[in-house]
Amino acid sequence: MELTKITISAIIDADSDKVWEAWTNPDHITKWNFASDDWHCPRAQNDLRVGGKLQSRMEAKDG
């Protein structure tokens, strides 16, 4: 199987500290990390240390 590289970029018109907080704080991640309004993100964890990992769960609200 041949892998295709995908690059996504975005320009966000907001204060960089607020963007960092929204992108890295699990309390904020659960408020935006879902595909559509009928989905949600019930939990997220983020360890920003070297070797740490980001974990989040996205699921449909109806189970």
Image (spheres, rainbow, N blue to C red):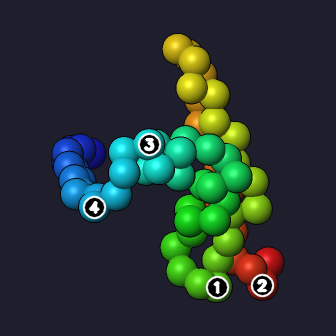
| Disc 2 and disc 4 in contact, CB within 8 angstroms | no
Instruction: Give the amino acid at mark 1.
Output: Asp
For disc 2, the marked residue is: 62
The quarter of the displayed image where residue 41 is located: bottom right
For disc 4, the marked residue is: 13
State the image coordinates of residue 46 (x, y, percent, origin top left): 63, 36
Instruction: Give the amino acid at mark 2.
Output: Asp
In the displayed structure, does residue 60 sit left or right of residue 34? right
Residue at 24% across, 57% down? 10
State the image coordinates of residue 1 (x, y, percent, origin top left): 26, 45
Residue 23 visible at all: no
| Disc 2 and disc 1 in contact, CB within 8 angstroms | yes
Residue at 70% across, 52% down? 27
The CA span between labels 2 and 1 is 8 Å
| Local secondary structure at mark 1 | loop
| Disc 4 and disc 1 in contact, CB within 8 angstroms | no
For disc 3, the marked residue is: 17
The CA span between labels 2 and 4 is 34 Å
